Every structure is written in structure tokens, then in C-alpha cells.
Image (cartoon, rainbow, N blue to C red):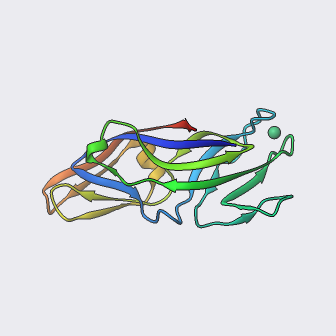
Amino acid sequence: MVKLALQIKCILDNVSSFGPCDAEGFGWCLSVKCPQCGEEHKNDIFVSKSEVHDIIGSRGTANFVMSCSFCKKASSIDILQIGDVYDASNSESFKTIMVAEFRGVEPVKFTPEGEWQCSAVNSNKKFSIADGAEMGADGWYDYDDEGACEVSITEFTHKFIKLK
Ligand SMILES: [Zn+2]
């Protein structure tokens, strides 16, 4: 089993913090591959801390279970920790937003699909980002009419870091 931290980096403009709308129920969208045969899973998977599934052939449970469509190896993922929101002091640096344990499966990519929310720097306004995938691909832009400024989240990147 491998414990990995998902770290993100982006540029926040007039945004004080942002994170998933519902951290517990958030579906973390991952592209994964099988470390045994190297086969990449065709469809992205969604792992959620609020979901509990029985592990095939064991009494345990995990937040996500699957088996490789090629070599049939069973695998599971557990979310161990959901980090604090990404805030203005983190802008342009990597910060861990989620830690998970991967058994028999390896993440290759994270897509910030799903609903996110953020707070403005110059007002008490909160924004909801309905399409996180678009934010990840093209950036997210809006206008804070109370603070009279543009707000944006751009240059979204991520990486996985191996933890001991
Ligand atoms: Zn396989």
C-alpha cells in the first residue's frame, strides 16, 4: 500500500481561500492505473470520503474498490485526510489538500471536477465554482461587485507526493 498526498498549486487573485463545497462528500476525480500490469483504467474514478464499500474477499471496507479490467487484481482506496482550504498565502506554491492510501492501484492524474467554493479578499462575498474541471483547464474568473474587483483562480496544477 502506498500513502500519497495530493498537492495543488494555483494563482489566487483577490480570492482569500477555496476548496470543495462539501469536503466529506466530494468526489475526487482520478485517472488510475494498475501497478501490476500497467493497464490504465479507461474511465476516471470518483473517490469520496463519505462512501463505504466492502473490499472483495476481505472483511474490510474502503472508500473505493475496483478490480483491474485486464489482470483482475483487486484494489482499494481510502481517504485518510482532507486538508485545509487552499488560501492566499499558498498562492503559487504546492499545498496538500487530500491524503489517501492506495492499495493495488496508482493515481496518474487528478481532475478538479465537481463543485468548489471560494471567498473574496475585498468583501464577504462567497462564490460557487460549479464546474471545477473548467477551472482546472482554463481557469475560473468572476467579478466581485461588493469589492469592485475581478476574482480569479488560474494556472491550476497538481502532483502526488509519496508519504511514509
Ligand atoms: Zn492489472
In the figure, is residue 111 to the left or right of 102?
Answer: left
- 24, 123: nearer the viewer: 24
In the figure, is residue 38 to the left or right of 26?
Answer: right
Question: Who's the residue at 28% across and 64% down the image?
Answer: 126
Question: Who's the residue at 86% across and 40% down the image?
Answer: 71
In the image, residue 33 lies at what x, y percent? 71, 39
In the image, residue 118 lies at what x, y percent? 32, 58
Q: Quadrant of the C terminus?
A: top right
Tag count = 0
The picture quadrant for ligand 1 comes to top right
- Above or below: residue 104 compared with residue 54: above
Extreme residue toward the top, this view: 38
Q: Quadrant of the N terminus?
A: top right
In the image, residue 121 lies at what x, y percent? 19, 54
- Above or below: residue 56 compared with residue 31: below
- Above or below: residue 164 compared with residue 48: above
- 133, 26: nearer the viewer: 26
Question: Who's the residue at 34% across and 36% down the image?
Answer: 93
Question: Who's the residue at 59% across and 49% down the image?
Answer: 100
- 151, 159: nearer the viewer: 159
In the figure, is residue 65 to the left or right of 7?
Answer: right
In the image, residue 154 lies at what x, y percent? 34, 41
